[in-house]
Image (spheres, grey):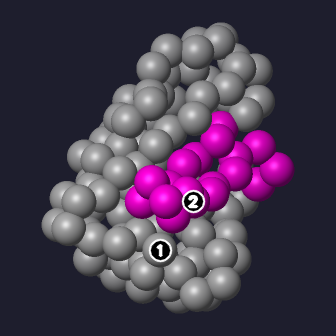
Amino acid sequence: VQLQACGGGLVQAGGSLRLSCAASGLTLRSSNVAWFSQAPGKEREFVAVISWNNDNTYYGDSVKGRFTVSRDDAKNMVYLQMNSLKPEDTAVYYCAVGAMLGGQVPARMVRYWGQGTLVTVSS
C-alpha cells in the first residue's frame, strides 16, 4: 500500500491550495482517510478526516470553516481544499488511513502514512 500527497506549495496568506491524496494497493472508498500537519519542531497534528461508511467529515479546531475534505471514488483520490490560509498553517501535510476515535484519527491509530507535501504560507 502506498499513499502519496501532493499539491503543496508557496501561497500568500488568505490564499488557497488543494492537496490531493492518491493511493495504490488500497481502495480509499473503503477507508477513513485523514490529513495531518506537522510544523517544524512540532508534533504531527490531526487536520481532517472523511469517514469510509457515510462520508462524514471532521476537522481540527484550527481549520474548521476553512478546510474541506472530499473524495473522488472514480479516481481513488481524497482532497483537502485549504482556503483562507494563514502563516500558522505552514507545515508538511500528510494523508493517512486509520481508525477513527471520537471524530478524529489519533496518530497512534494510523495504519498507513503517505509521504508529505510542504505547504508554506507567507505573510
| Residue lying at the far front of the rendered structure | 74
Residue at the image position 70 percent from the left and 51 percent from the top: 68
Residue at the image position 56 percent from the left and 67 percent from the top: 49
Q: Does residue 57 show up?
A: yes
- Asked where in the image residue 123 lies, by quadrant, the reply is top right
Are discs 2 and 1 less than 8 Å apart at CB?
A: yes
Is residue 71 positioned above or below 109 on the image?
above
- Asked where in the image residue 36 lies, by quadrant, the reply is bottom left
What residue is pinned by disc 2? 71
Label 1 SS: helix
Q: Position of residue 97 (x, y in %)?
A: 37, 71
- Asked where in the image residue 72 lies, by quadrant, the reply is bottom right
Residue at the image position 43 percent from the left and 81 percent from the top: 30
Which region shows up in magenta?
Answer: 64-82
Q: Position of residue 23 (x, y in %)?
A: 30, 58
Q: Amino acid at mark 1?
A: Arg
Residue at the image position 58 percent from the left and 87 percent from the top: 53
Label 2 SS: strand
What residue is pinned by disc 1? 29
Specify few, some or many for label 2: CA neighbours under 10 Å numbering under 14, 14-19, or 20 or more.
some
Q: Amino acid at mark 2?
A: Arg
